[in-house]
Amino acid sequence: MRRGRLLSAGALTVALGFCATGAWTYTQARTDQELAFGRERDTALAEGRQRLTVLTTLDASTRERAAAGIEAWRDASTGPLRTELARTEPAVGPSARATVTEAALTALDTRAGTAKLIATVQVEVTPRGGAATTDRKRLEAVLTRTGETTWRVSALSAVPVAGTEEAGPE
């Protein structure tokens, strides 16, 4: 009888120790800076992808749709890019519909609220009255955090594809 109580007490002690270790580990993980950094990285990447899709898409089939698309560009941007886009006038012309196929952050500074994103974008361009063509682009975007959690594009540039530049003299 005494042996059974000792085994039960030992099992209870091991179970309590296991529960205490689990609770301590959970508490550490919830307050861990790496976890917070990971969340910030995921948010910047997701919002960067979404903003890049907006900035590479425009329905210019009518002047009103073009104006709405340009307004969406302004909402997706900040800083110098937003200032530049503010000068854009809506016009009827070719329309573009983009899809970000791959994206990754190459830099993230949570204190400064900046990040760099590289992405490949598939763009379907439809000229007025013509057949659509599809092109792939590689872009680099500088993201800036505006507010507590919102990321917007402050700079956007094309990334040259390796092997497309002419070889110069060495």
Image: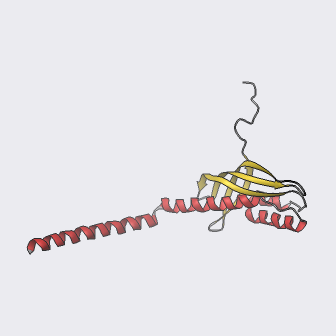
- The structure residue drawn at horizontal position 45% and vertical position 66%, both measured from the top left corner, is 31
**What kind of colouring is applied to the model shown?**
secondary structure
Camera-nearest residue between 41 and 136: 136
Give the quadrant of the C terminus: top right
Q: Against 56, is 9 above or below?
A: below
Q: Is residue 100 visible?
A: yes
x, y (%) of residue 55? 76, 59
x, y (%) of residue 126? 84, 56
Q: How many marks?
A: 0
Q: Against 97, is 16 above or below?
A: below
Left or right: residue 53 versus residue 36 is: right
Camera-nearest residue between 108 and 20: 20
Q: Quadrant of residue 95?
A: bottom right
Give the quadrant of the N terminus: bottom left
- The structure residue drawn at horizontal position 31% and vertical position 69%, both measured from the top left corner, is 20
Camera-nearest residue between 107 and 128: 128
x, y (%) of residue 153? 71, 58
Identify the residue at the far left of this view: 1
Left or right: residue 16 versus residue 131 is: left
